[in-house]
Image (cartoon, rainbow, N blue to C red):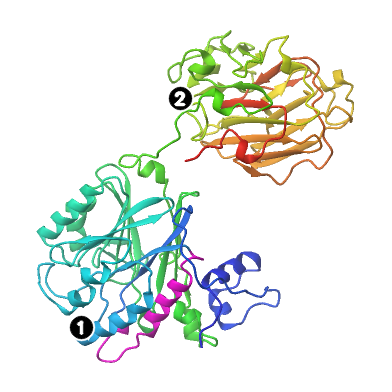
Amino acid sequence: MENKLSRRSLLQAAAAVPIISAASAAAGTTSASAAPLSATPQAGRPDAAAARFTIAVLPDTQYLLDDGGSDAEPVRATLRHLVREQAQDNIVFMTQLGDVTEHGTATEMRAASRAFEAAGRLPYSVLAGNHDVSGDDQRGDSPYLRTFGPQRFSRMETYGGASPDGYNSYHVVRGGGREWLVLALDWRLSDAGLAWTQGVLDDHAELPAILTTHDLVWAEDDGAAHLSDNGQRLWDRLIKGNDQIFLALGGHYWPSGRTTLTNDAGHPVHLHITNYQDRYYGGAGMVRYYAFDLARGVVDVETFSPWLLAKDEPTPLEAEHVELSGDVDRFTVEIDFDERFAAFAPPVLPAPRPPSAVMPRGTVAYWRFDEAGLGAAGSDGAPVAPGTVARDLSGNGNDLTSTLLHASTPAALTWSAEHHDDQPAHASLRFDGGKGPDRGAVLHTGPDAPVNTMKFESGYTIETFLKLPEPFEGDHSWMGVLSWEGRAGDAGKQGGWSEDDAPCSLNVTGERFLQFVVYPVPVDDDPTSWSHALPVGRWTHIAIVNDGRHTTMYVDGSKIARNASLESRGISTVGKPFALGGTQGGGKFGQGFYGSIGDTRIVSRALRPDQFLTAVKR
């Protein structure tokens, strides 16, 4: 009887309760503190636009499809599992790695065909291994070709076509909001097969490609993999010269293993061997998940047997093989997808948006550092001279003027074309502030700017984009990002952190946490919000939203946990300028900001996240 427990529910439970091995969970021997597991939806289609999606890999099944005595049920169980969990695990495709059968006979191929009927409408590819065929892809007719030739895949929505001989094929798979090319290549490509494959790559030159074949790499006992003779031929004549190919998968050999090689473009190519026919029950229908996570820039890999997972009372040997967790069976591959694919598929970024498109009702001030804001765009690294004016594009007269702090050199403030992908203006300012001796630069409003005296008692939204350098060198703790100048004490505020605090400021702590501290109008207090540690080398969007009662900070559109619970209405400004690039203490600037700042906007009401500066259709 098939257990209703799904793979995804098992993983979800593992995140919520003390660690329990998959084998123990499958055997029902969980700890007393474990929470009950619930079933997951059993139907539905995958979401091709989601940032996380899965490509399943089914390795050699030959010992389970053998005339001499075998059991195809583990294969069927795996395929049923993939269909059942297709939506929950967002499985967009399955690729098989050859040696479908042991002898390649017509009888075995009929059995394989019946087993693969369990895949239903799940799109998949199959390729020939040396136990299915002999010779290269010019061998002509065979039971394999009659079973797993082009006619089997022609109605699949992913299917792109096959070589004239029928033994090589390709699929175009949608996942993560983009298309991916999957090559399913015969175990021995002829020169004609190589030429056909190159033509497919040329015709899909903008698509990242995953190459699958039967014989690619072999591995030592520690999992270190090396190109086989056939793999070397594929590497020399196909893989290394086509930068699109970033992942190549093979079976044939055991144990499993992996390696990373550098192609002609200087980029990494990940080569993996996946084969478990030497394990219990001919591999027990083991399947490997390649879970692509475009948001995190990783591919999470895990290996398990759905057939064993579904057993109500597995034997000790079965429980041992429910899930494999060695370094070659469960691991993470880090890939900066935008950077890795930039040479052939650069990311399509939103075009710059005009100021008029990002000034909603209630806009008090909007500053940006492209031609619209500065009057002229500089070149990367060019100093921004003292006295340079960044115009307030709202038309309210809150222009900013640049000033160097202390004895800082012009290098303390420079212009850059770098920017957050979703920032309206494609430009920023680079601040080189620091301690000991204090240095930096600020841009602040003039003495009569309206924003200097505004109290914002009905609410406000303050937004900015910032990037901390990588490497993040030196001590920059408690540096200011933006603030209103002056002292809280001058507004009659004696409680809180200090009378010498600025009335309102956004700062970065020594742990790279954001600190937003404000002295409200009606109370003598300092409600303070704290973010998590900011990453370095990456643009971040910050929004501080006050609805007239409480303040909520958002980082990259997500609400943080440590928002101030105290009531907070308005800002106790004291008529002093608004400043970008620093925070005063005791009415004086010390160190300046260290990093980059982009578009900054102040609106005199609370905005929703879908109204932030990042609200752009991609």
- Label 1 Cα neighbours within 10 Å, binned few <14 / some 14-19 / many ≥20: many
Left or right of residue 413: residue 485: right
SS type, badge 1? loop
- Between 463 and 270, which is closer to the camera in this rendering? 463
Instruction: Check if residue 66 falls in the magenta segment.
Output: yes
Asked if one can make out residue 596 in the rendered structure from this viewpoint, the answer is no
Above or below, comparing residue 320 to residue 343 in the picture:
below
Q: Quadrant of residue 136?
A: bottom left
Above or below, comparing residue 412 to residue 228 in the picture:
above
- Label 2 Cα neighbours within 10 Å, binned few <14 / some 14-19 / many ≥20: some
- Between 232 and 369, which is closer to the camera in this rendering? 369
Above or below, comparing residue 511 to residue 378 in the picture:
below
Q: Residue furthest bottom?
A: 69
Task: Please tell me which residue is depicted at 10% across the width and 59% down the height of the picture.
Answer: 192
Left or right of residue 33: residue 136: left
Measured as percent of width and height from the top left, residue 572 is found at: 82, 24
Q: Amino acid at mark 2?
A: Ala
Q: Amino acid at mark 1?
A: His
SS type, badge 2? loop
Task: Please tell me which residue is depicted at 45% across the width and 81% down the height of the picture.
Answer: 307
Q: Quadrant of residue 251?
A: bottom left
User: Which segment is the magenta one?
Assistant: 63-89
Task: Please tell me which residue is depicted at 67% across the width and 26% down the height of the picture.
Answer: 602
Residue designated by label 1? 103
Residue designated by label 2? 417
Q: Residue furthest front?
A: 361
Instruction: Check if residue 262 falls in the magenta segment.
Output: no
Q: Quadrant of residue 81?
A: bottom left
- Marks 1 and 2, how far apart in space? 61 Å
